[in-house]
């Protein structure tokens, strides 16, 4: 197993993708979980942030649709996320509804 949790979210353009990724990285660092790697931040079409037990993917819609990572995790339980997470994503992306999904790779969901 490579990671325990897999989070996928969408921003509408490169600026929103980078802003969402920066905010996620900042908030988790504040919570004592610094990233061990960040890929794709310059391009802003798909940013991957590795927190070891959690991997976050922030996509533009076209890339998310093309790669369809949700299909790779189709057997994993999809988790509900708290309002403070989905609400933050909604505000950052400027969307009417949040587009954030989280998956757990194990059988026991905390």
Image (spheres, helix red, strand yellow):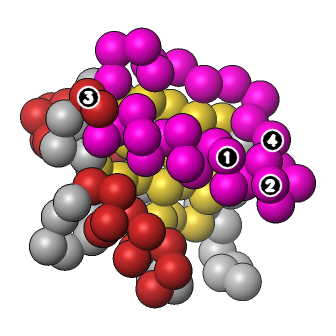
Residue plotted at (49% across, 73% down): 85
The answer to whether the residues at label 2 and label 1 have Cβ atoms under 8 Å apart is: yes
The span from disc 2 to disc 3 (Cα, nearest Å) is: 24 Å
Q: Which residues are magenta?
A: 16-44
Identify the element where label 4 is drawn. Answer: loop
* Residue 28 appears anywhere in the view: yes
Taking depth in this image into account, of 100 and 103 the one nearest to the observer is 100
Badge 1 is on which residue? 26
The span from disc 1 to disc 4 (Cα, nearest Å) is: 8 Å
The span from disc 2 to disc 1 (Cα, nearest Å) is: 6 Å
Identify the element where label 2 is drawn. Answer: helix
Percent coordinates x, y for residue 63 in the rendering: 20, 31
Depth-wise, is mark 2 or mark 4 nearer the camera? 2
Percent coordinates x, y for residue 61 in the rendering: 15, 42
Which numbered circle lies on residue 14? 3
As for residue 20 lying within the magenta part, the answer is yes
Badge 4 is on which residue? 34
Q: Residues within 10 Å of mark 1 (few under 14, many from 20)?
A: some
Badge 2 is on which residue? 30
The answer to whether the residues at label 1 and label 3 have Cβ atoms under 8 Å apart is: no
Q: Residues within 10 Å of mark 2 (few under 14, many from 20)?
A: few
Which callout, 1 or 4, points at the residue further toward the start of the chain?
1
- Of all residues, the one furthest to the right in this rendering is 32
């Amino acid at each position: 197993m490579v990671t325990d949790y897999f989070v996928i979210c969408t921003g509408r353009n490169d600026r929103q993708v980078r802003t969402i990724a920066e905010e996620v990285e900042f908030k988790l660092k504040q919570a004592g979980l610094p990233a061990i790697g960040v890929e794709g931040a310059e391009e802003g079409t798909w940013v991957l942030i590795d927190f070891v037990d959690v991997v976050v993917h922030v996509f533009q819609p076209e890339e998310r649709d093309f790669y369809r990572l949700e299909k790779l995790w189709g057997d994993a339980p999809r988790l509900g996320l708290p309002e403070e997470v989905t609400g933050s994503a909604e505000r950052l992306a400027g969307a009417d509804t949040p587009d954030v999904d989280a998956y757990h790779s194990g059988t026991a969901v905390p």
